Amino acid sequence: MTTALGVAAASASALALGIAPAQAAGEVYEASNSIISSDVTAKTYFAADGEILTALDMLKDGHGTAAQWRYNSSSATHSYYNGNGYAVPKDWDLSFAEGTTLQIRACLQDGSDGTPYRCGGWEYAKA
C-alpha cells in the first residue's frame, strides 16, 4: 500500500509540472485530446505499476477533464471526471489482471454530470 501511495504521489507531482510521471518498475501510457500539441487541453495517464489512471487538465479554460478507459476495442467505456482545475491531477486506483490490454483517452467534460466531449483517439495500454 505504501508503494502504491508513493507512486501516486510521485505521479501527481510530475503531472502537475506537465510531464509524464517516471516509473522505475512499469510503463506509463499517455493519451491527449488532440494530436496537435498546442491544442492539448486534457491528458490521461495509465501507470501499469499500480494500475493508476490519472486525468489532468492542461488549460485554464473553465472546463473539467475526463479520463476514459475500455477493454481492448470494447463498446463499454468507463469515464472518470476531474473537476479539480488546471494542473491538478486526479488519480483512480484500478484493478486489472496482469497483462490485460486496455485503451485510454482524454476528453473535456463540464461538471460531474456532464458528457465527455472533444475526446482524443484511443491509445493502447497494458496492465
Image: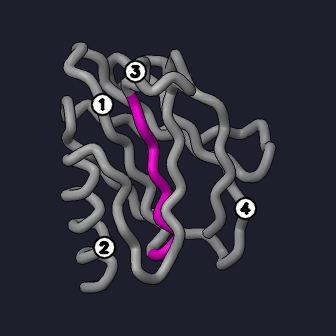
Q: Earlier in the sequence, mark 4 or mark 3?
A: 3
Q: Secondary structure at mark 3?
A: helix
Is disc 4 placed on a helix, strand or loop?
Answer: strand
The residue type indicated by label 4 comes to: Thr
Residue 91 lies in what quarter of the image?
bottom left
- The majority secondary structure of the magenta stretch comes to strand
Label 1 sits on residue? 58
Label 2–label 4 contact, CB within 8 A: no
Q: Earlier in the sequence, mark 2 or mark 4?
A: 2
Magenta highlight range: 42-49
Whole-Å distance between the Cαs marked 1 and 4? 26 Å
Type of residue at label 2? Val
The mark that comes first in sequence, 2 or 1, is: 2
- Residue 62 x/y as whole percent: 22, 14
Please report the residue visible at 72 percent of the width from the left and 52 percent of the height from the top.
71
Q: Is residue 40 left or right of residue 78?
A: left
Circle 2 — which element? helix
Identify which residue, 46 or 68, lies in the foreground.
46
Foreground tag (4 vs 3): 3
How far apart marks 2 and 3 lie (CA) works out to 29 Å
In the image, 10: left or right of 121? left
Q: Residue at x 65, y 44 (%)?
A: 123
